Image (spheres, rainbow, N blue to C red):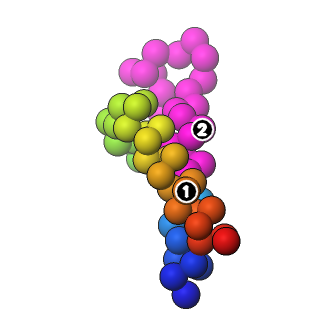
Amino acid sequence: MAAGAALVGGVPVAAWGLMGQQNHDGLPASELDYAFQPWDIGDGVAAVAGGLALVLAAAGAA
């Protein structure tokens, strides 16, 4: 049960944190259109959260 929860919680966060923000090249942030505005989280924090979630997901898969 805990392994499944680790996979369900860890994989999406790992994908988000390690992939980074995917903006269209050439458009300033003021012209991007969002259904929901993304949280203002720094790239370093997102990478650390993604790395920790990847470890959590790997532990859940094991």
Q: Between residue 8 and residue 57, name the one nearer to us.
A: 57
Whether label 2 touches label 1, CB < 8 Å: no
Split into 4 quadrants, where in the image is the C terminus? bottom right
Q: Residues within 10 Å of mark 1 (few under 14, many from 20)?
A: some
Name the amino acid type tagged 1.
Val
Q: Where is residue 32? Give x, y as percent.
A: 48, 27
Q: Where is residue 16? Give x, y as percent.
A: 54, 46
In three-dimensional space, the C-alpha distance between marks 2 and 1, rounded to whole angstroms, equals 15 Å
Q: Residues within 10 Å of mark 2 (few under 14, many from 20)?
A: few
- Residue 10 visible in the picture: no
Tell me which label, 2 or 1, sits earlier in the chain: 2
Q: Of helix, strand and loop, which one carries label 1?
A: helix
Image: magenta residue range: 14-35
In the image, residue 9 above or below residue 45: below
- Residue 34 highlighted magenta (yes or no): yes
Q: Residue at x 59, y 67 (%)?
A: 59
Q: Where is residue 41? Give x, y as percent.
A: 34, 37
Q: In the displayed orientation, state which residue is furthest to the right.
A: 62
Q: Residue at x 43, y 21 (%)?
A: 29
Closer to viewer: mark 2 or mark 1: 1
Name the amino acid type tagged 2.
Met
- Residue 17 highlighted magenta (yes or no): yes
Q: Which residue is mark 2?
A: 19
Q: Where is residue 56? Give x, y as percent.
A: 52, 62
Split into 4 quadrants, where in the image is the N terminus? bottom right
Q: Which residue is mark 1?
A: 55
Q: In the displayed orientation, state which residue is furthest to the left.
A: 40
In the image, residue 35 above or below residue 59: above
Instruction: Please give the label number shown on residue 47.
Output: none
Q: Residue at x 37, y 38 (%)?
A: 45
Q: Between residue 15 and residue 35, name the one nearer to us.
A: 15
Q: Of helix, strand and loop, which one carries label 2?
A: helix
